[in-house]
Structures are given as C-alpha cells and as structure tokens.
Image (cartoon, rainbow, N blue to C red):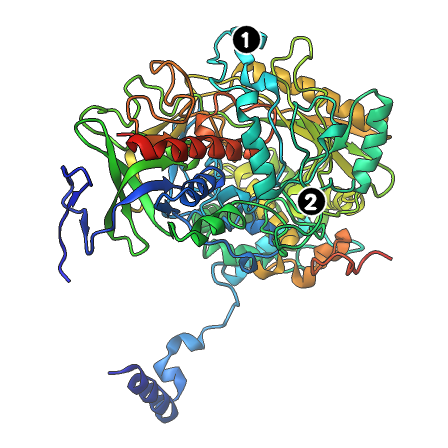
C-alpha cells in the first residue's frame, strides 16, 4: 500500500467506523507529558517550585520548568529516567508514611523541611530504598535551574520570564534592551 | 562502478595493501602533496601556508561548517555549558571517550557529560566559539626549566624553539587572522616588531572599575588583546559587543578564526580541497617507516584512502595523540612516533582560578564579551611561583552558570537563592585566569582497549593527575584576584581556587606530542616533524612543551605558521622522502 493509499484508507475508515474504534489510545486522558505520569508530574512540579519559588517574580511552575524536564527525560537525558521514577516513588512513599499525604499536598514549609533532609542524605535505606536521596535532589535541582534560566526553546523559561527577572536583553541586539531605562 | 578491494599506489610505486578488507573504495582518490587532518587553529593555517605555496592539499575535518543560526543565544547548547549538546560538535553519541579518575574506576564520557575535555569539531574548531584572547607567550614561557630549574615530579622542560624564533609567526597570526590590542600598555609584553593590527577594545564598566583599583595597587592593567574586530576588518563587521560571545558563534562574524580567514584563502587558491564530515582513523606507514596516506570514513561512513607525500596532524592534543597511537606499523608497533612511549604523555590544560566580588551597585553592563582588562603582573618573577598566570575580568556570566556562583554558605536553592540571583546578577564582578600547569608524565592520553566509537575505532582514554604545585599556584593567583576586587570596593569577596584532581585537558588541551631535540624524550622535533618519520608532522597544541599562563590559541596559530612555513619551504627539494 502506498503512503497515499494508506492515508486515504485511514481517512475513509475513520469516517465509517469512528476514530475510537481504530485508535483506542485516543480514549486515554491526554496528560501532555512525554515521560511523567500525571501523578508524577504533580510531585516534580512541587519540588521544582521549592527550588525556584514564586515571589515578586514568577517561579518554576509559572515558567513551565516541568515541560523542560519532561522533554529532556524523553530525549537527551534518557539515562536519568530511572533516578526520577525511583526518586518520586521513594519520596511519595516516605511522605505517605510520615504525613499521610502526597508530597504536593504538604504545606510549603513542610515540603522545604523534607527536601533539606533529602539534600543532606538524612534518610536511611529503609526510608529511601533506591539510590541516594541527595543524588535525586541534586539532579532535580540542576534540571530546574536549567529549565528556568535556559532558552525557552527547550520547554521552560516561558516567554523569557527569568530573563525579565534578571533584566537581561532579548533578542540580543545592543540598543534594544527592554529592561533598562 | 565496482567496489573492489583496495590496493592504492603511492607515487613511488610501492603498494599499500590494506590489512583490513573493510577498506574499500569506489573511486581512487587522487594522490596529493599534503594531507592536513583537522581544520582548527593549527590545521587551517598549515593548509593555507601549503596551498598558497603551490602544494596540493586535502584538508580533512570530521565536523561541518559552523552555522550561527542553529543555536543563537542558547546557553544550554553552547560551548560554555554543553548541557543539551555541543553546538560545534562532535556528535555526542558517536564519539565517546573514557576517563579514569584516581580512586575511581574507568568511566565512559561523552561531549555533554563531565570530564570529556571537549574542544569542538567543525571547520575552524574552537576558533569559531572561543573567547578569542590573543596572547603571545612571554620569553620565559619557552625556557621554563632554564628559568626555574627542575621541578620534582614534573616533566617541565625548555622548548626547542625560542620566543624569538616564533615572533614572526605570532606577527603573521595577528595580521592574517586579525587581532585588536595595544601591547604598549603592557610593560611585561614580550618584544614585538609590529603593533597589533587593530586598536584595542574599550573597557566595559566592570573593567573600568577594576582598572582604577589595580592602578592604586601598583599593578599594570591593559586592554585585553582579542582575535576580534574592534573596527571593520577583512571585509567583515566590527564587534557589536554582543552579550553572549564566548562559547557562541558571532552573529555578525566579527570574531576571527581560521574558518573566516585562512581556510577560505586556502580553498580559493584552487589547491586545497576541504573534506568535511570525514573521520580520519589511521595514518598508513609503510615498512620503510614512511607515511603514505590516511584511512578515513567519508560523510557516508564509507571507508576510503587518501595518499599524499606529506601528512600533517592537527586534531588537538587528545585526538592527535589518539590518531598517532592508533596508527600501528612494522617499525612503529606502538603507534606512529611512539617507540619511546611519549605520545599522549604530558596532557595539560589550564586550571582556572580567581575570585568574585559583590558590589552595591550594578557593576556589569553586559557589553560583550565581558573580558576587557588584563594583568600580566603575575606571569613570572613572583617569588616561589613557577610560571604563574594572567588575570582578566571574566567573560559575561550566563544565567544558568550564575546559579552556581555564590559566596560560601549561601542557599543552593529556594527563596534565598532566587533572591540572590535576581539582585546580584548585575553586581558580581569576577577576576580570573589560567595557571601555568606543571606537565606530568602520568597525565596522559592512551587508546582504550575495549571502548570503540561509532566507526569501531578505539577511543581516547584520559588518566592521571595534576601536579600538587598547580593548586598552590592557583591559591597565589586567586589571592591576587581577590585583592583587586577588594580595592575596587567589593563589600564581600571570595575565592574560587582551581588546580586539584585531574586529569587535566579541557579546551586548552596541549602537550601530548611534545617538541624536543631528543627522540627519546619527545615526539616531534623543533619543526613539528615526528622523530624518525620525516614526512609526518604535527601542528597543533600537542607539540607545546608547556601550556603557559595564557590562553593558547594565538600560540597554536603561530605554531601553525611555524610548521607550515617549514614544510612549504623545504618541500620542493626532497618532498621529505
């Protein structure tokens, strides 16, 4: 079957049977993520917001840092997938055990305390079975900084938010600096 | 068209039968006078010197022509971070290396994952995206052993060439590639016959403040020499002081490298064919010890052979050493020029060291490239310090890199970290410089016995440590940098001291095929000619005996003129046969 024929077949078949029958995956809820499950994304969004919280200027959530991390994990950072998957699982299990909630549902200061414990490797193997908590935390920290301060072309730093915060120019033409009076 | 097993003929008539049946070719490549492997700072110049002197040349480059538009203003894909890729090559999947750290096992590394010592792989190589500092080494840099004596645990040695020998080559590099500067303001500058061709750059605001402060300290600040156009030059524009300069290609082509100067000249002679995306894997050496040509994979990954009278290797310190080591033959069973086990030894680079200072006003104006003022007060003649290094204000700090610039004890993340980023990004000055490293016999490039690249060729393996004095010298230089920042009015300062661990290497990689008069303790002679293989030369940072306390680009260019000029002048007689 040539490409053109295949396209025509799909088109006409869709009309005849409806796309749901032909493409059952269309029934699934679309998460918008390539790597994270919707549940995982909520956890990572909360961790990123801890690393770069919103104050007088936007934080990691506003800048779409999660999309940067998600995109790179499904591409060039594929070797970090396991660290994320295990790290999220460990974190959620520990939080559930200690607080009876998911990480993203803790209050901000509780989240901060918990991440400080991760950063300083204070959790033992029982509480953090796979890998070292600091390795997971430091990885998310680096990726959050990259997503927030890197070019929007990679998924984060929406509308050059961090460049506006830093008062640096874009596009990069001398004499067109938008943030200096 | 038939594919047949290779049996190339050199012009002397003896046959070079490939020992690998995979080496086949569709059409014979025409024999040429010279092959140059690597179109970077050294190779681009050699190709031009040979082509303009009438030699037929094939210039091999494993990368492509650089393209500014591909990653404009993208910190994560820049030579400064290489987080998401290397804009100027090489391909991060096809070109692994291995690194062995002390106390740790061997690790496979890629251009985008730590310790790789990536330079670049494109036409012009590092000269496309470099910071473009245009330093001449000082007279002392060529005779470190004479000046400082033997250094325990180091292979520190004099060069077989002097500053005086290379002076005309420095001058050629400055005028043909294009340098802005005014050495008359630097009392420590080595003697020169001709001034730098373009006027120096104006100081940016940070530099003005540091200039005044260092004057009060009795130091000798001067405008940093740059391989960039301060005025329109050579048919190209003047620098627009773009914020993102070092680590990026220039949007108006005002940064001078071999890709926009000598390589186009070489090609325009009609004598030089540039073959991009071609990966040279072995230098063929016959049973009489003559280099006959190279084996390479073309852009379609087809194995090919190119023969020539003379071969010049300019792949930068790590890849040059790898190519020599992978070129085994009857008379050189351990690699070309390696009968005395010196190929790959003395891998050096530059430990960077300096200090930061916080100011209570916006000291940075972010006019590019950032670095504009320099000091040579700490190169030589400082009691107890061997070599030393220059200091300069730093290239513009980039937003992601700045997230790791913090005084000791600062928040690494969270509200405090963000507040610092926002309020101090324009208020953090930095003075920094490269230290003269002590060459180490055990700091080296070998070929890995197990790991192979995409083409099945054993990869470069880096190992060894820095000399303990490097860190001591770094402490000295960082202390001086901090003094300048304090005098300039910084309300808080802290040092960032380099020079520990290893192996060395990095973008300033050098030393792996060192020059020398004795074939038992060096790889090439004073003209870059491999000992015992008269028609094989090396012309890049590999042949440097020591790395200097300066960025090495202009010195590598001068060596390109030195080696290229020697070959061009002597080729007509014997063709080095």
Image point 77% across, 61% down: which residue? A176
Secondary element type, mark 2: loop
Vertical relation: B218 (above or below) B265: above
Q: Nearer the viewer, residue B107 or B214?
A: B214
Mark 2 belongs to chain: B
Mark 1 belongs to chain: B
Contact, CB < 8 Å: mark 1 with mark 2?
Answer: no
Q: Is residue B408 visible?
A: no
Count the numbered circles shown. 2
- To which residue does mark 2 refer? B369
Image point 79% across, 46% down: which residue? B365
Query: Disc 1 and disc 2: Cα gap in Å?
Result: 37 Å
Vertical relation: B298 (above or below) B115: below
- Taking the image as shown, residue B427 lies to the left or right of residue B115, namely right
- Taking the image as shown, residue B438 lies to the left or right of residue B25, namely right
User: Looking at the picture, how far across and down is residue B188, in whole percent?
Assistant: 70, 21
**Which circle's residue, 1 or 2, is located before the other in the chain?**
1
Vertical relation: B149 (above or below) B447: above
- To which residue does mark 1 refer? B146
Q: Quadrant of residue A154?
A: bottom right
């Amino acid at each position: 079957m040539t490409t053109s024929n295949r396209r025509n077949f799909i088109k006409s078949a869709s009309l005849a049977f409806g796309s749901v029958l032909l493409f059952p995956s269309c029934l699934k809820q679309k998460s918008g993520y390539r790597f994270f499950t919707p549940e995982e994304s909520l956890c990572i969004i909360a961790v990123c917001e801890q690393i770069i919280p919103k104050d007088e200027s936007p934080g990691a959530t506003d800048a779409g840092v999660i999309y940067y991390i998600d995109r790179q994990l499904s591409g060039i950072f594929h070797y970090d997938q396991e660290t994320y998957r295990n790290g999220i699982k460990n974190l959620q299990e520990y939080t559930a055990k200690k607080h009876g909630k998911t990480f993203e549902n803790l209050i901000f200061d509780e989240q901060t305390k918990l991440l400080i414990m991760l950063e300083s490797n204070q959790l033992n193997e029982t509480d953090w079975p796979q890998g070292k908590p600091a390795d997971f935390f430091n990885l998310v920290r680096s990726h959050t900084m990259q997503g927030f301060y890197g070019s929007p072309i990679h998924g984060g730093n929406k509308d050059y938010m961090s460049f506006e915060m830093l008062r640096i120019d874009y596009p990069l033409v001398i004499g067109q600096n938008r943030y200096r009076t | 068209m038939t594919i047949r097993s290779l049996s190339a003929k050199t012009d002397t008539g003896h046959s070079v039968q490939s020992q690998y049946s995979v080496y086949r070719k569709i059409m014979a490549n025409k024999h040429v006078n010279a092959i140059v492997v690597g179109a970077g700072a050294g190779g681009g110049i050699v190709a031009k010197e040979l082509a303009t002197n009438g030699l037929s040349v094939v210039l091999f480059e494993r990368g492509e022509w650089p393209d500014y538009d591909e990653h404009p203003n993208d910190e994560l894909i820049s030579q400064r971070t290489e987080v998401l890729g290397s804009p100027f090559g090489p391909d991060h999947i096809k070109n692994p290396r291995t690194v062995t750290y002390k106390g740790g096992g061997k690790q496979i590394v890629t251009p985008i994952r730590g310790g790789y010592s990536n330079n670049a792989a494109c036409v012009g190589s590092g000269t496309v995206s470099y910071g473009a500092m245009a330093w001449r080494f000082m007279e002392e840099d060529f005779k470190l052993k004479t000046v400082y004596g033997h250094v325990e645990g180091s292979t520190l040695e004099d060069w077989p060439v002097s500053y005086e020998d290379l002076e005309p080559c420095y001058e050629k590099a400055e005028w043909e590639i294009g340098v802005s500067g005014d050495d008359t303001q630097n009392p420590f500058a080595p003697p020169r016959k001709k001034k730098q061709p373009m006027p120096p750059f104006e100081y940016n605001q940070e530099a003005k403040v540091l200039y005044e402060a260092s004057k009060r300290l009795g130091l000798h600040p001067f405008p940093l020499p740059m391989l960039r156009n301060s005025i329109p030059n050579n048919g190209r524009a003047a620098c627009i002081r773009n914020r993102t300069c070092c680590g990026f290609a220039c949007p108006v082509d005002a940064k001078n490298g071999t890709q926009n100067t000598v390589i186009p000249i070489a090609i325009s002679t009609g004598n030089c064919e540039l073959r991009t995306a071609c990966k040279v894997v072995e230098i063929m050496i016959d049973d009489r010890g003559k280099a006959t040509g190279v084996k390479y994979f073309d852009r379609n990954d087809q194995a090919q052979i190119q023969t020539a009278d003379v071969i010049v290797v300019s792949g930068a310190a790590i890849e040059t050493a790898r190519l020599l080591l992978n070129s085994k033959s009857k008379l050189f069973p351990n690699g070309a020029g390696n009968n005395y086990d010196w190929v790959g030894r003395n891998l050096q680079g530059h430990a960077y060291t300096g200090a930061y200072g916080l100011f209570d006003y916006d000291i940075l104006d972010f006019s590019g490239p950032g670095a504009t003022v320099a000091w040579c007060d700490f190169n030589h003649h400082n009691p107890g310090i061997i070599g030393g290094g220059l200091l300069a204000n730093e290239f513009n700090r980039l937003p992601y890199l700045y997230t790791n610039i913090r005084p000791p004890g600062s928040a690494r993340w969270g509200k405090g970290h963000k507040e610092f980023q926002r309020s101090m990004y324009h208020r953090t000055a930095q003075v920094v410089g490269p230290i003269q490293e002590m060459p180490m016999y055990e700091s080296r490039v070998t070929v890995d016995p197990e790991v192979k690249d995409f083409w099945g060729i054993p990869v470069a393996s880096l190992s060894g440590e820095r000399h303990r004095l490097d860190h001591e010298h770094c402490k000295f230089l960082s202390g001086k940098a901090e003094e300048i920042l304090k005098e300039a009015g910084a309300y808080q300062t802290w040092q960032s001291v380099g020079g520990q661990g290893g192996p060395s290497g990095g973008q300033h990689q050098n030393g792996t095929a060192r020059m020398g008069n004795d074939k038992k303790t060096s790889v090439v002679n004073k003209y870059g000619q491999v000992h015992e293989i008269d028609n094989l030369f090396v012309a890049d940072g590999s042949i440097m005996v020591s790395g200097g306390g300066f960025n090495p680009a202009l010195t590598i260019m001068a060596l390109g003129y030195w080696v290229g000029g020697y070959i061009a002048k002597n080729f007509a007689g014997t063709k080095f046969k």
